[in-house]
Amino acid sequence: MDAMSTPSPLLAGPPDRYLTCQNCAITFVWTGWEQQTAEQAPHLCPGCRHLLTLTRRLRGTVKWYDRRKGFGFITASDGSEVFVHRSNLVGVHVLRRGQVVAFRREAAENGPLAVDIELLAAAEPETPPSPHP
Ligand SMILES: [Zn+2]
């Protein structure tokens, strides 16, 4: 007569855990299912993780830049080409081919647009010259 204490055989995974977000300090649930699919506990709550993907900065290399017209293109690290305009440069006035930059990619009418462009390094010597057609 011990039917009250029968554990459910369906609950195979570990119990839910409560973690604290290292960014906003809220407590969030790390479910047993997530614990089985993730290799380590997440540092950020789902909201902050989502925000991170939205504001994630990309790295890229300046493909070419026309300093007189004030625009050019960056080749992002994922291989895509992103339009750059001088109004979105931060801390620099011009770019030169081969310079490494960090930026955020925004969707614009005519295609991807680089904003908040920061210079990370001067032209890399190993970058092969690719003359602007
Ligand atoms: Zn958070």
Image: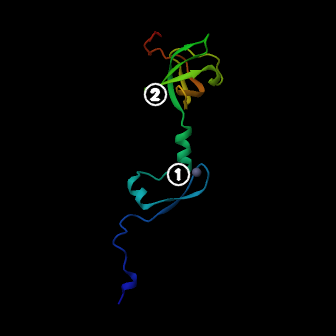
Q: Which mark is residue 46?
A: 1
Residue 47 at x, y percent in the picture: 56, 50
Residue 56 occupies quadrant: top right
User: What residue would you read off at disc 2?
Assistant: 77
Q: Tell me: is circle 2 under 8 Å from ligand 1.
A: no
Above/below status of 6 relative to 70: below
Indicate how the structure is coloured in the image: rainbow
Quadrant in which the N terminus is drawn: bottom left
Q: Report crowding for label 2: few under 14, some 14 to 19, many 20 or more residues within 10 A (C-alpha).
A: few
Residue 96 at x, y percent in the picture: 55, 14
Describe the element under mark 1 as helix, strand or loop: helix
Marked residue nearer the N-terminal end (1 or 2): 1
Residue 16 at x, y percent in the picture: 46, 63
Q: Which residue of the protein is positioned furthest toward the left in this rendering?
A: 9
Q: Residue at x 42, y 56 (%)?
A: 34
Q: Amino acid at mark 1?
A: Pro
Which residue is more in the foreground, 55 or 124? 55
Q: Residue at x 55, y 24 (%)?
A: 101
Q: Report crowding for label 1: few under 14, some 14 to 19, many 20 or more residues within 10 A (C-alpha).
A: some
Q: Which residue of the protein is positioned furthest toward the bottom in this rendering?
A: 1
Q: Residue at x 44, y 51 (%)?
A: 40
Query: What distance separates the C-alpha of mark 1 from that of mark 2?
Result: 26 Å
Count of numbered circles on the image: 2
Q: Amino acid at mark 2?
A: Ser
Q: Tell me: is circle 1 under 8 Å from ligand 1.
A: yes
**Image side of residue 7 versus residue 81, left or right:** left
Describe the element under mark 2 as helix, strand or loop: loop
Q: Which mark is residue 21?
A: none
